Image: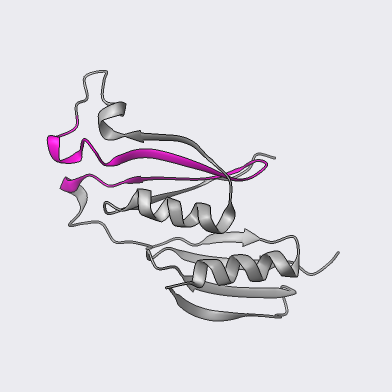
């Protein structure tokens, strides 16, 4: 089965958000391209967008990536951060679940504290300081 990578859009602060995520998950950026660097094949971004992040990719595990970009200035009025999505993280241990939850919750808003549930050994949800909703899940042992 193929992995699923999550792609996030931000209203101009993608670089700051991804530096924060790198501080939580570790890993390295596989690529950081501005709109200016993505220009070509008949597409040329407006001057106001040229320095925005057009694509960034952060490897957060052996085969999982967190990717993102800034929305163009023309799309900002219609853009709403965090709607219709959560990023679900399935932790491998209690220590990892707690580290991820606490790291992502820093400066954000906890919706549900990390706790034991009927469906998980530990589960919690939060919205990070950039408006991205996350679920941290430690499955029950098999």
Farthest residue in the left direction? 47
**Is residue 37 a member of the stretch shown in magenta?**
no
Quadrant where the image shows the C terminus: bottom right
- Residues 83 and 58: in front is 58
Question: What residue do we see at 27% from left, 51% from top?
Answer: 12
Q: What stretch of residues is rendered in magenta?
A: 45-74
Please, is residue 83 above or below residue 25 in the view? below
Q: Residue 84: which quarter of the image?
A: bottom left
Q: How many marks?
A: 0
Farthest residue in the right direction? 142
Q: Could you tell whether 73 is left or right of 128 in the image?
A: left
Name the spot of residue 33 as percent of width and height, x first. Answer: 36, 33
Q: Could you tell whether 139 is left or right of 25 in the image?
A: right
Name the spot of residue 98 as percent of width and height, x first. Answer: 65, 71
Question: What residue do we see at 29% from left, 61% from top?
Answer: 80
**Is residue 66 a member of the stretch shown in magenta?**
yes
- Residues 11 and 19: in front is 19
Question: What residue do we see at 60% from left, 65% from top?
Answer: 100
Q: Which color scheme did the rendering employ for the protein?
A: one colour
Name the spot of residue 34 as percent of width and height, x first. Answer: 31, 35
Q: Could you tell whether 51 is left or right of 119 in the image?
A: left
- Residues 85 and 128: in front is 128
Question: What residue do we see at 54% from left, 73% from top?
Answer: 125
Quadrant where the image shows the N terminus: top right
Name the spot of residue 91 as percent of width and height, x first. Answer: 69, 61
């Amino acid at each position: 089965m193929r992995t699923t990578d999550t792609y996030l859009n931000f209203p101009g602060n993608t670089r700051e958000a991804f530096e924060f995520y790198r501080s939580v998950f570790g890993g390295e950026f596989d690529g950081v391209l501005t709109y200016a660097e993505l220009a070509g094949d008949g597409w040329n971004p407006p001057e106001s967008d040229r320095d925005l992040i057009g694509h960034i990719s952060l490897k957060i595990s052996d085969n999982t990536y967190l990717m993102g970009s800034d929305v163009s200035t023309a799309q900002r009025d219609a853009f709403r951060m965090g709607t219709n999505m959560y990023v679900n993280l399935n932790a491998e241990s209690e220590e990892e679940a707690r580290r991820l939850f606490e790291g992502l919750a820093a400066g954000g808003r906890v919706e549900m504290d990390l706790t034991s549930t009927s469906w998980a050994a530990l589960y919690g949800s939060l919205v990070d300081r950039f408006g991205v909703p996350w679920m941290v899940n430690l499955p029950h042992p098999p």
